[in-house]
Amino acid sequence: MFCGVHLTDPAVAVPTLGLIDALARVGVGEHAARSTVSRMLRRGTLERRRQGRRIVLSPTPRARAELAEGGERAWRSPVNRTWDGQWTLLGFSLPESRRADRHLLRSRLLWAGFGMLQNGLWVAPRQVDVEALLQRLDVLDHLKVFRAQVAAPTHVPDLIDDAWDVATIARGYEQFLDRWDRPDPLPGAPDDLARQLWLLAEWTLLVRSDPGLPVEYLPADWPAVRAEHVALRLRTRYEAGAAAIAAGLVERLDTPGAASR
């Protein structure tokens, strides 16, 4: 979360100790933090950059694009008030030998708000650019994608119940409200940077499990409505303080350019 908020500028990087400091604020020990940094370097999420004689860290271009996409997804309203009645349907068939690709495909579909209607058939309550979503996976030739409306004898509430666990989604928002909808959330956190990182991490995980179902088919007291107001208010409340603290951890690169080997 720190990288996705405070390292969006390609000309800004963070020393390893600065990133360890940020992680320590949310309870990550030094050994675990160093292991996390090493793993992110191996996976191509972070890269080393030279700053004088020192080495600092920044997201790779691919990771920065993915972080931007994730940030947009996290703060897109989960409350679907203007549904046009259209669904995106996606069917796929991959052989058993491509089990890893099936796993990646399902992960991306869940991230985009799809639910599994039945084996090999997924549905989302909005228009989805499937080509853009799955462009990095070698699966497009194995897909069939449609835009459709529900027709009798199918009913929208039944379709929603078949594809999503609405009670579990609601419970996630209720737990979020229990934790954050109070005058002084996380009073034990050391500062606004810690509170910001906790908020973003929890909210992102929460909305990843919410496909944005049409609100007219959800309970009248759907907790996502209140949770969204709380999340947006706290996001604004912590922004300035968190940015000031983060500014003391990151550095502007003297000569932005290629990664260090």
Image (cartoon, rainbow, N blue to C red):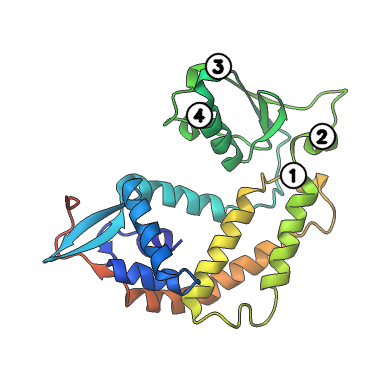
Q: Earlier in the sequence, mark 4 or mark 1?
A: 4
Amino acid type of the residue tagged 3 in the rendering: Pro
Q: Earlier in the sequence, mark 4 or mark 2?
A: 4
Amino acid type of the residue tagged 4 in the rendering: Ala
Asked whether the beta carbons under mark 2 and mark 1 sit within 8 Å of each other, the answer is: yes
What label does residue 214 carry, if any?
1
Q: Determine whether 22 is above or below 71 in the image.
A: below
- Name the residue that disc number 3 marks: 95
C-alpha gap between disc 4 and disc 2: 32 Å
- Name the residue that disc number 4 marks: 100
Q: Which callout, 3 or 2, points to the residue nearer the camera?
A: 3
Residue 184 location (% of width, % of height): 64, 82
Q: Earlier in the sequence, mark 3 or mark 1?
A: 3
Residue located 50% across and 27% down the image:
101
Residue at the farthest right position: 153
Q: Earlier in the sequence, mark 2 or mark 1?
A: 2
Q: Which callout, 4 or 2, points to the residue nearer the camera?
A: 4
What label does residue 156 carry, if any?
2
